Amino acid sequence: MATLLDRVTYAAGQTARVGWFLAHYAAGRRQLKPMPRPDFPVGPFPDRQALLRDMRHLFEREWHDIAAGLFPRPPVLDPAPVAWLRRSAAYFRDLRQVDQRRHAGINDEPNLDPAHDHLPRYYRQNFHYQSGGWLTGESAEVYDIQVETLFTGAADVMRRRALKPIATFLDGRDQRAARLLDIGTGTGRLPGFIHHAFPGLRIAGLDLSRPYLDHARRTIGASGRLKWVEGAAEALPIADASVDIVTSSFLFHELPKKVRNTVVAEIARVLKPAGQAIIVDSALEADLPAWKGLFDLFPYYFHEPYFTDWVTSDPDALFAAHGLTPMATELAFLSRVMVFSKDTAD
């Protein structure tokens, strides 16, 4: 049962996180040179009050679920202050190079390195204009700070909206007998939160980037119930009908349309009948038409070549085409949390 102290501790911790990353955002803005005006139409923007209101509602919903006993108060993953200060310094050092790439339109440095030739072409890019793309240890060190700064401290709580449908799915089941696969796991934040909330689950986090998986092992840990697997979401090294839950967070907007379709087919293949896919990704333009300007400018400022195709797509139709029935959708600040169930006929 959550206590008043739990609520105060949760609120204080989340407020501190938001303040920390707001400070990074403000300091970073001062280092960036203004970009030229885009040569395409840009839609409307939410005002600051609307953004803050939606962010506040996001945290309120998480606390409501904690108070209801769906999952415990989230842990601080990798809590060492010295490590975060070191990553903060690395983030600001890389920010200068990010800005140079942004203005020069340079986004394919990882593709020029023969060491990456074994990886899919779409993956060998400077996503977010970040040094090394997602293919170096240095990139893994700054990734979480970069993303949290972009979302001013709300990225982890958006990821954690996956915990509610996981709790619902596991209700009445023995979680020790269940298996969960997180695809495109990156630095392992979502599996880390899932492992804390549901320690009996057998969890595997899969990613193409060995340096990012190494970072996950160091910061999140590994055990008999939490493993890290190197592999591609479009060719899962997993047996048919062997997984109860597949999760992903902020993966699908990074995939070309054709690859996205293949990934959904793979999810359907590895899920058991009546298993669920729980997907957290960017909200769609249709979800937030009054915020369209954010969707227009995000790929322009951050090199997201497949983002526009995602935010104008129909995920329900995509998943349904592979026998995954839409069960629920939640809008959570700038994210969309989608639950799909595999048809039992399969």
Image: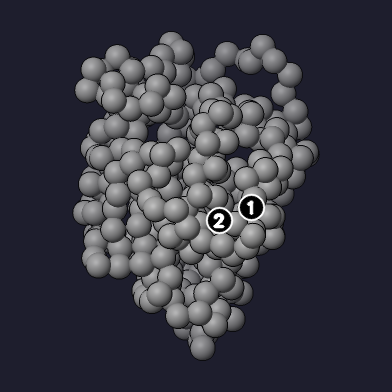
C-beta proximity under 8 Å, tags 2 and 1 = yes
- Judged from the image, the secondary structure of the residue bearing numbered disc 1 is strand
- Judged from the image, the secondary structure of the residue bearing numbered disc 2 is strand
Q: Is residue 116 left or right of residue 120?
A: left
- Label of residue 324 in the image: 1
Q: Quadrant of the C terminus?
A: bottom right
| Residue in the foreground of this view, choosing between 329 and 68 | 329
Q: Is residue 80 left or right of residue 330?
A: left
User: Can the viewer see residue 123?
Assistant: yes
- Label of residue 177 in the image: none
Amino acid type assigned to the residue bearing label 1 in the image: Leu
Disc 2 crowd rating (10 Å Cα; few below 14, some 14-19, many 20+) is many
| Residue in the foreground of this view, choosing between 93 and 338 | 338
Residue 202, how many percent across, how many down? 36, 67
Tag in front: 2 or 1: 1
Q: Is residue 130 left or right of residue 262?
A: left
Q: Earlier in the sequence, mark 2 or mark 1?
A: 2
The residue where tag 2 is placed is 277
Q: Residue at x 70, y 33 (%)?
A: 312
Residue 191, how many percent across, how many down? 39, 59
